[in-house]
Amino acid sequence: MKKIGLVGLGFIGKTHLDAYQRIENSQVTVICTRSEVDQEIISNYKGSFVTDYDTLLSNKEIDVIDICLPTYLHEEYIIKAAKAGKDIICEKPLTLTVESANRIVNEVSKHQVNLFVGHLLRFWPEYQLIKSYSESDKLKDIEIVHAKRLSQVPKWSSWFQHPEKSGGALFDLHIHDIDFVYYLLGEVDSVYAVGNKNKYGAWDHVMTTLSFKNGSKAFVEASGRMPLGYPFTIGFRAQANQSTLDFNVIAGENIENLDQSDHSFIYYTDEQKSSVEIDKGDAFENELDYFVDCLETGRNNSVIPLDEVVYTLELLNAIKSSLETKREVFV
């Protein structure tokens, strides 16, 4: 049983707390937050609350620190946890620069603790199936990918809109599909991106073309500037020579209530199409259960190793460079 210290109780923190309650070999023992806590959480949660991070780190019962804080705080909080000898789970993005990522990796290595980064699509049932199809004759040798992730401006906090705090939609939304196409197709040769900035200077609508070393191409779009009332929209189309897999979701304002959203998942071959059935599963639960199991069993983290986390950040920074220079950037 791993005892978890959960840091941050915003949208993602609450989502992690809910997922842990369904994972047998983990228990959220302490929540560290300075925000007012919902009465529903107080009623259903059997652990304790603290407001001071150092107090949490000094608790010898805590095995794992789960960081669900704004991105600009990640490096500081991860390094403190590493120095305290705690294993760490951190929401994506790990940080905003490769230099910061390297400092983090050096610290966790130095203190011999484990760090897991929540790149959720690698644990999302539909995307797991896309990955498995790509490794079989059903979708062998993907030639073209088209992916999109469109959202309204997040309402629950203003820090998302500031580039120095969140990296904008580039690091908050675009990262999901950029990481997954890398997971699916391998290393990238070059990127070319165009987009728009918000009034604070954050890239909040980005369209990127990626050319992969295996010859595949991907066009990926992300927006955090859709108008009020526009549904959270996900799309992913992967095309091979003789087949195509097409996944689409139209949800609410965010990823909440996905079970009630409009889904389609269709597999096409020449002159045939069929709906793809997906086993029910929660991506956050899959992700956190995997991380905890790695710690419990000593299993190697092969789904999202740290070198791949850093590589995805390299891609995002190459895309940022392309946006700023208006040129193709080689990786």
Image (tube, grey):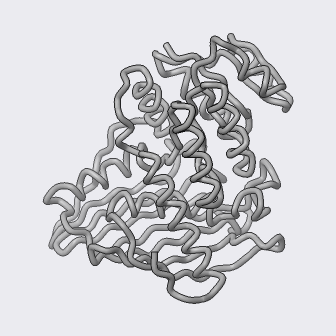
179 or 55: which is nearer to us? Answer: 55
329 on left or right of 198: left
Point out residue 98 in the picture as x, y percentages from the top left corner: 59, 60
75 or 220: which is nearer to us? Answer: 75
Q: Is residue 72 above or below residue 302?
A: below
Asked whether residue 207 appears in the rendered view, the answer is: yes
Q: Is residue 205 above or below residue 43?
A: below
Instruction: Place residue 136 in its image quadrant.
Output: bottom left
Point out residue 58 in the picture as x, y percentages from the top left corner: 73, 18
The residue shown at (60%, 49%) is 94
The residue shown at (43%, 79%) is 190
Quarter of the figure that contains the C terminus: bottom left
Point out residue 158 in the picture as x, y percentages from the top left corner: 82, 55
Q: Is residue 21 above or below residue 303?
A: above
112 on left or right of 28: left
Q: Is residue 82 above or below residue 251?
A: above
112 on left or right of 242: right
